[in-house]
Amino acid sequence: MQHPIAHRTAARLRTIREQWGALEAAVETPPTSREWPPAETRAFLNTGSSDGALLVEDRAPLTLRDHPAPANLDALDCGLFVEQQVFDLADTLAAAVQHADPSGRGRWVYRNPGAPDARTATGSRAHGLHWAALYVEGRVLDEDTTPEYDEAGTLLPAPFSPLPEHLLHEAARVTQQCEQRIARALTADTITASRTLPTPCPSCGGALVARGAPAEPPAVTCRTGAACGADTGQDAQGRRVWAWPECLPLLLAAQQAEDVLPQAA
Protein backbone atom coordinates (compact mmCIF):
# COMPACT_ATOMS: atom_id res chain seq x y z
CA MET A 1 0.00 0.00 0.00
CA GLN A 2 1.33 3.41 -0.95
CA HIS A 3 2.10 5.95 1.73
CA PRO A 4 -0.76 8.48 2.22
CA ILE A 5 1.75 11.28 1.78
CA ALA A 6 2.43 10.03 -1.75
CA HIS A 7 -1.20 10.53 -2.79
CA ARG A 8 -1.37 14.01 -1.22
CA THR A 9 1.87 15.01 -2.93
CA ALA A 10 0.66 13.69 -6.30
CA ALA A 11 -2.56 15.73 -5.88
CA ARG A 12 -0.52 18.86 -5.17
CA LEU A 13 1.58 18.27 -8.26
CA ARG A 14 -1.57 17.97 -10.37
CA THR A 15 -2.84 21.24 -8.91
CA ILE A 16 0.44 22.95 -9.77
CA ARG A 17 0.20 21.73 -13.37
CA GLU A 18 -3.47 22.69 -13.72
CA GLN A 19 -2.94 26.21 -12.39
CA TRP A 20 0.29 26.87 -14.30
CA GLY A 21 -1.48 28.38 -17.32
CA ALA A 22 -3.35 30.87 -15.12
CA LEU A 23 -0.12 31.86 -13.40
CA GLU A 24 1.65 32.40 -16.73
CA ALA A 25 -1.24 34.59 -17.88
CA ALA A 26 -1.03 36.61 -14.66
CA VAL A 27 2.62 37.44 -15.40
CA GLU A 28 1.54 39.36 -18.49
CA THR A 29 -1.36 41.29 -16.96
CA PRO A 30 -1.32 43.97 -14.25
CA PRO A 31 -2.83 42.79 -10.96
CA THR A 32 -6.25 44.16 -10.14
CA SER A 33 -7.29 45.30 -6.68
CA ARG A 34 -10.09 43.64 -4.67
CA GLU A 35 -10.91 41.15 -7.39
CA TRP A 36 -10.93 37.35 -7.20
CA PRO A 37 -10.01 35.46 -9.26
CA PRO A 38 -7.74 37.92 -11.12
CA ALA A 39 -9.45 39.00 -14.32
CA GLU A 40 -6.52 37.81 -16.39
CA THR A 41 -7.08 34.22 -15.27
CA ARG A 42 -10.77 33.92 -16.07
CA ALA A 43 -10.30 32.62 -19.62
CA PHE A 44 -8.16 29.82 -18.26
CA LEU A 45 -10.59 28.94 -15.48
CA ASN A 46 -13.68 28.98 -17.72
CA THR A 47 -14.06 25.34 -18.70
CA GLY A 48 -16.92 26.19 -21.03
CA SER A 49 -14.69 28.15 -23.40
CA SER A 50 -15.01 27.27 -27.08
CA ASP A 51 -11.24 27.54 -27.44
CA GLY A 52 -10.76 24.11 -25.86
CA ALA A 53 -8.44 23.05 -23.08
CA LEU A 54 -5.38 25.12 -22.34
CA LEU A 55 -2.21 23.28 -23.32
CA VAL A 56 0.77 24.32 -21.24
CA GLU A 57 3.08 21.32 -21.60
CA ASP A 58 4.56 22.64 -24.86
CA ARG A 59 5.30 26.11 -23.53
CA ALA A 60 8.92 27.02 -22.92
CA PRO A 61 9.73 27.29 -19.23
CA LEU A 62 9.87 30.71 -17.65
CA THR A 63 13.59 30.26 -17.03
CA LEU A 64 14.18 30.09 -20.80
CA ARG A 65 11.88 32.94 -21.81
CA ASP A 66 12.50 36.67 -21.76
CA HIS A 67 10.17 38.90 -19.77
CA PRO A 68 11.42 42.39 -20.65
CA ALA A 69 8.48 44.10 -18.97
CA PRO A 70 6.41 41.71 -16.84
CA ALA A 71 3.16 43.34 -15.78
CA ASN A 72 2.90 41.41 -12.53
CA LEU A 73 6.23 40.96 -10.77
CA ASP A 74 4.67 38.96 -7.93
CA ALA A 75 3.32 36.40 -10.38
CA LEU A 76 6.65 36.23 -12.21
CA ASP A 77 8.56 35.75 -8.95
CA CYS A 78 6.12 33.00 -8.00
CA GLY A 79 6.53 31.23 -11.34
CA LEU A 80 10.32 31.38 -11.21
CA PHE A 81 10.31 30.13 -7.62
CA VAL A 82 8.00 27.20 -8.37
CA GLU A 83 9.92 26.18 -11.49
CA GLN A 84 13.23 26.24 -9.66
CA GLN A 85 11.87 24.25 -6.73
CA VAL A 86 10.30 21.55 -8.91
CA PHE A 87 13.34 21.34 -11.20
CA ASP A 88 15.70 20.98 -8.25
CA LEU A 89 13.41 18.38 -6.70
CA ALA A 90 13.48 16.37 -9.94
CA ASP A 91 17.29 16.52 -9.87
CA THR A 92 17.33 15.25 -6.30
CA LEU A 93 14.92 12.37 -6.88
CA ALA A 94 16.62 11.33 -10.12
CA ALA A 95 20.01 11.18 -8.43
CA ALA A 96 18.59 8.85 -5.78
CA VAL A 97 16.37 6.43 -7.72
CA GLN A 98 17.03 6.72 -11.47
CA HIS A 99 18.98 3.83 -13.03
CA ALA A 100 20.88 3.67 -16.28
CA ASP A 101 18.42 2.81 -19.04
CA PRO A 102 19.56 2.71 -22.71
CA SER A 103 15.98 3.23 -23.89
CA GLY A 104 15.82 6.56 -22.12
CA ARG A 105 12.15 6.01 -21.28
CA GLY A 106 10.86 8.60 -18.85
CA ARG A 107 14.34 9.63 -17.73
CA TRP A 108 15.24 12.97 -16.20
CA VAL A 109 18.21 14.52 -18.02
CA TYR A 110 20.47 16.75 -15.96
CA ARG A 111 21.79 20.11 -17.08
CA ASN A 112 24.90 20.18 -19.25
CA PRO A 113 26.65 23.57 -19.04
CA GLY A 114 28.96 22.59 -21.90
CA ALA A 115 26.15 22.03 -24.41
CA PRO A 116 26.09 24.27 -27.52
CA ASP A 117 22.62 25.74 -26.99
CA ALA A 118 20.47 26.73 -24.02
CA ARG A 119 17.83 24.04 -24.42
CA THR A 120 20.36 21.23 -24.63
CA ALA A 121 22.28 22.70 -21.73
CA THR A 122 19.24 22.67 -19.47
CA GLY A 123 18.43 19.01 -20.17
CA SER A 124 14.90 18.02 -19.17
CA ARG A 125 14.29 21.51 -17.79
CA ALA A 126 13.85 22.64 -21.38
CA HIS A 127 10.52 20.76 -21.45
CA GLY A 128 9.14 23.04 -18.76
CA LEU A 129 7.28 22.77 -15.48
CA HIS A 130 4.63 20.36 -16.79
CA TRP A 131 7.08 17.59 -17.63
CA ALA A 132 9.09 18.12 -14.44
CA ALA A 133 5.96 17.81 -12.29
CA LEU A 134 4.94 14.62 -14.11
CA TYR A 135 8.39 13.15 -13.54
CA VAL A 136 8.31 13.96 -9.83
CA GLU A 137 4.79 12.52 -9.55
CA GLY A 138 5.98 9.27 -11.10
CA ARG A 139 8.79 8.97 -8.57
CA VAL A 140 6.51 9.81 -5.66
CA LEU A 141 4.05 7.11 -6.74
CA ASP A 142 6.88 4.58 -7.32
CA GLU A 143 5.99 4.08 -10.97
CA ASP A 144 8.25 1.88 -13.14
CA THR A 145 9.98 0.27 -10.16
CA THR A 146 9.25 -3.35 -11.14
CA PRO A 147 11.36 -5.36 -13.65
CA GLU A 148 9.45 -6.27 -16.81
CA TYR A 149 9.92 -8.66 -19.74
CA ASP A 150 10.48 -7.27 -23.22
CA GLU A 151 8.98 -8.73 -26.41
CA ALA A 152 11.85 -11.23 -26.67
CA GLY A 153 11.18 -12.56 -23.19
CA THR A 154 14.21 -10.95 -21.60
CA LEU A 155 13.75 -9.65 -18.09
CA LEU A 156 14.71 -5.99 -18.03
CA PRO A 157 15.69 -4.19 -14.83
CA ALA A 158 13.37 -1.49 -13.54
CA PRO A 159 14.41 2.04 -14.59
CA PHE A 160 13.75 3.39 -11.09
CA SER A 161 14.04 2.29 -7.47
CA PRO A 162 11.27 2.96 -4.94
CA LEU A 163 11.57 6.41 -3.40
CA PRO A 164 13.07 6.43 0.12
CA GLU A 165 10.73 7.77 2.78
CA HIS A 166 12.92 10.75 3.65
CA LEU A 167 12.78 11.90 0.02
CA LEU A 168 9.02 11.34 -0.05
CA HIS A 169 8.72 13.76 2.86
CA GLU A 170 11.01 16.21 1.08
CA ALA A 171 8.84 16.04 -2.05
CA ALA A 172 5.77 16.64 0.11
CA ARG A 173 7.36 19.70 1.71
CA VAL A 174 8.42 21.23 -1.61
CA THR A 175 5.14 20.62 -3.42
CA GLN A 176 3.07 21.96 -0.53
CA GLN A 177 5.15 25.13 -0.49
CA CYS A 178 4.78 25.54 -4.26
CA GLU A 179 1.03 24.92 -4.24
CA GLN A 180 0.47 27.47 -1.48
CA ARG A 181 2.59 30.07 -3.24
CA ILE A 182 0.65 29.65 -6.49
CA ALA A 183 -2.61 29.95 -4.58
CA ARG A 184 -1.47 33.20 -2.96
CA ALA A 185 -0.32 34.59 -6.32
CA LEU A 186 -3.65 33.84 -8.00
CA THR A 187 -5.81 35.08 -5.16
CA ALA A 188 -3.77 38.30 -5.04
CA ASP A 189 -4.57 38.71 -1.34
CA THR A 190 -8.20 39.53 -2.08
CA ILE A 191 -9.58 36.84 0.23
CA THR A 192 -8.08 37.61 3.62
CA ALA A 193 -11.15 36.97 5.78
CA SER A 194 -14.53 35.24 5.70
CA ARG A 195 -17.18 36.58 3.34
CA THR A 196 -20.53 35.29 2.11
CA LEU A 197 -20.67 34.67 -1.62
CA PRO A 198 -23.58 36.07 -3.69
CA THR A 199 -24.17 32.66 -5.28
CA PRO A 200 -25.82 29.70 -3.47
CA CYS A 201 -24.52 26.19 -2.88
CA PRO A 202 -24.91 24.21 -6.14
CA SER A 203 -26.20 21.20 -4.19
CA CYS A 204 -28.63 22.48 -1.54
CA GLY A 205 -29.01 26.20 -2.31
CA GLY A 206 -27.56 27.23 1.06
CA ALA A 207 -25.23 30.12 1.74
CA LEU A 208 -21.57 29.73 0.76
CA VAL A 209 -18.75 31.31 2.76
CA ALA A 210 -15.26 31.89 1.33
CA ARG A 211 -12.34 31.87 3.72
CA GLY A 212 -8.69 32.64 3.12
CA ALA A 213 -5.49 33.75 4.78
CA PRO A 214 -2.18 35.19 3.53
CA ALA A 215 -0.38 31.89 4.21
CA GLU A 216 -3.13 29.54 3.02
CA PRO A 217 -5.14 28.98 -0.17
CA PRO A 218 -8.86 29.83 -0.12
CA ALA A 219 -11.70 27.42 0.64
CA VAL A 220 -15.49 27.60 0.39
CA THR A 221 -17.90 26.20 3.01
CA CYS A 222 -21.65 25.55 2.80
CA ARG A 223 -23.48 26.85 5.89
CA THR A 224 -26.27 24.28 5.59
CA GLY A 225 -24.23 21.73 7.49
CA ALA A 226 -24.54 17.95 7.37
CA ALA A 227 -27.87 18.15 5.52
CA CYS A 228 -26.10 19.38 2.40
CA GLY A 229 -25.43 16.52 0.02
CA ALA A 230 -22.63 18.09 -2.01
CA ASP A 231 -20.05 15.61 -3.26
CA THR A 232 -17.03 17.14 -1.53
CA GLY A 233 -15.12 17.03 1.75
CA GLN A 234 -16.41 17.90 5.21
CA ASP A 235 -15.01 19.83 8.13
CA ALA A 236 -15.14 18.83 11.83
CA GLN A 237 -18.73 20.16 12.09
CA GLY A 238 -19.92 18.11 9.12
CA ARG A 239 -20.21 21.12 6.80
CA ARG A 240 -19.36 20.60 3.12
CA VAL A 241 -16.07 22.24 2.20
CA TRP A 242 -14.53 22.85 -1.22
CA ALA A 243 -10.79 23.17 -0.69
CA TRP A 244 -8.26 24.59 -3.13
CA PRO A 245 -8.41 24.12 -6.12
CA GLU A 246 -11.94 22.58 -6.15
CA CYS A 247 -13.33 25.90 -4.90
CA LEU A 248 -12.21 27.78 -8.04
CA PRO A 249 -15.47 27.28 -10.03
CA LEU A 250 -17.52 28.53 -7.06
CA LEU A 251 -15.33 31.60 -6.61
CA LEU A 252 -15.40 32.32 -10.33
CA ALA A 253 -19.21 32.08 -10.43
CA ALA A 254 -19.43 34.43 -7.44
CA GLN A 255 -17.13 36.95 -9.12
CA GLN A 256 -19.19 36.86 -12.31
CA ALA A 257 -22.36 37.45 -10.26
CA GLU A 258 -20.75 40.41 -8.50
CA ASP A 259 -19.76 41.89 -11.86
CA VAL A 260 -23.41 41.79 -12.98
CA LEU A 261 -24.96 43.23 -9.79
CA PRO A 262 -23.64 46.81 -10.18
CA GLN A 263 -24.87 46.92 -13.77
CA ALA A 264 -28.32 45.66 -12.74
CA ALA A 265 -28.51 48.29 -10.04
Image (cartoon, helix red, strand yellow):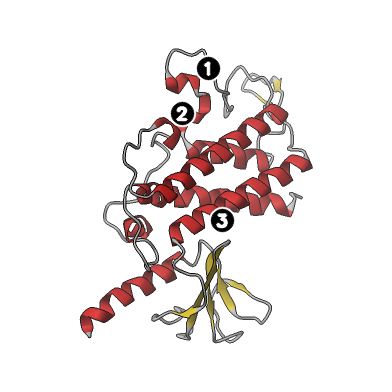
On the image, numbered disc 2 is attached to which residue?
Answer: 126
At mark 2, the secondary structure is helix
Q: CA distance from mark 3 to mark 2?
A: 24 Å
What amino acid is labelled 3 in the image? Gln
Q: CA distance from mark 2 to mark 1?
A: 13 Å
On the image, numbered disc 1 is attached to which residue?
Answer: 113
Coordinates of residue 146 in the picture (x, y in percent): 72, 33
Sequence-earlier tag: 3 or 1: 1
The residue under the point 29% across, 58% down is 49
Q: Nearer the viewer, residue 211 or 125?
A: 211
The residue under the point 56% across, 35% down is 87
Q: Is residue 224 above or below residue 24?
A: below
229 left or right, relative to 27? right
What amino acid is labelled 2 in the image? Ala
Sequence-earlier tag: 2 or 1: 1
The residue under the point 53% across, 53% down is 181
Coordinates of residue 250 in the picture (x, y in percent): 43, 71
On the image, numbered disc 3 is attached to which residue?
Answer: 180
At mark 3, the secondary structure is helix
